[in-house]
Image: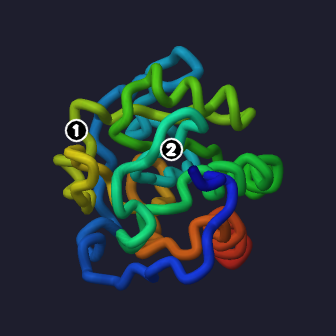
Amino acid sequence: MTDPHVLPPHLPVPTDDGACAHLPGRRWPAHALPGTDGAAHDLSAMPGRTVVYAYPKTARPDQAMPDEWDVIPGARGCTPQSCAFRDHHAELRAAGARVFGLSVQATAYQQEAAARLHLPFALLSDAVGAVRQELGLPTFQAGGETLLRRVTLIVRDGVIEHVFYPVFPPDRSAQDVLDWLAAHPT
């Protein structure tokens, strides 16, 4: 098993296939998603800025990732990305943004990762796919699962203001968001 905290060299770089071009200006769907904090979160009703980083699947130390995980462009790096948002959380809050992670994994699975990684924000589960389908978020298949491709969204007053896609390297995602927020103050 490889260390999920470390990005191996020579990961394939995802390319912009236009799968998120339709998202800026779209209203976030009115769905309350379960969070690892025990609350349901309806991002469409939240005032101000919200950062949502969608990720495929966090690794568990006791389980192997799907075969060929490291050769799927953009698949590897969920743990480093989450840790980067954890490490920059205070700065993101100071910049006026709340943070959520989003995946199709069940809340119980996400809770293990949130606790193990000491995340100060909730991970949201879109296991039923309501948000994914309404927004038309890009996906890929691995290990018999349909997983979200990595994309980071800035939602302002319930409307998608900015999209980072593709996201690479994933451990730089939080800094990229901070840089964008600094260049686009409210």
In which image quadrant can residue 116 be found?
top right
What crowding class fits label 1: few (fewer than 14 Cα within 10 Å), some (14-19), or many (20 or more)?
some
Q: Are marks 2 and 1 in contact (CB under 8 Å)?
A: no
User: Pointer 1: what residue?
Assistant: 129
Residue 186 visible in the shown view: no
Look at label 2 and name its amino acid: Thr
Tell me, for residue 58, which label it has, or none.
2
Instruction: Please provide percent x and percent y for residue 117.
Output: 70, 37
- Position in image of residue 60 (x %, y %): 55, 37
The one of 61 and 21 positioned closer to us in this rendering = 61
Look at the picture and state if 122 lies above or below 185: above
> In the rendered structure, which amino acid carries the disc numbered 1?
Gly
The image quadrant that residue 84 belongs to is: bottom right
Single out the residue that lies furthest toward the top: 38
| Figure colour scheme | rainbow
Q: Is the residue 13 above or below the residue 53 in the image?
A: below
Mark pair 2, 1: CA separation = 17 Å
Rendered residue at 22%/48% (across/down): 146
Q: Which of marks 2 and 1 is nearer the N terminus?
A: 2
Identity of the residue furthest to the front in this view: 1
Nearer to the camera, 69 or 124: 69
Write down the quadrant of residue 98 in the picture.
top right
User: Going 65% across and 73% down the picture, which residue do you hit?
Assistant: 176
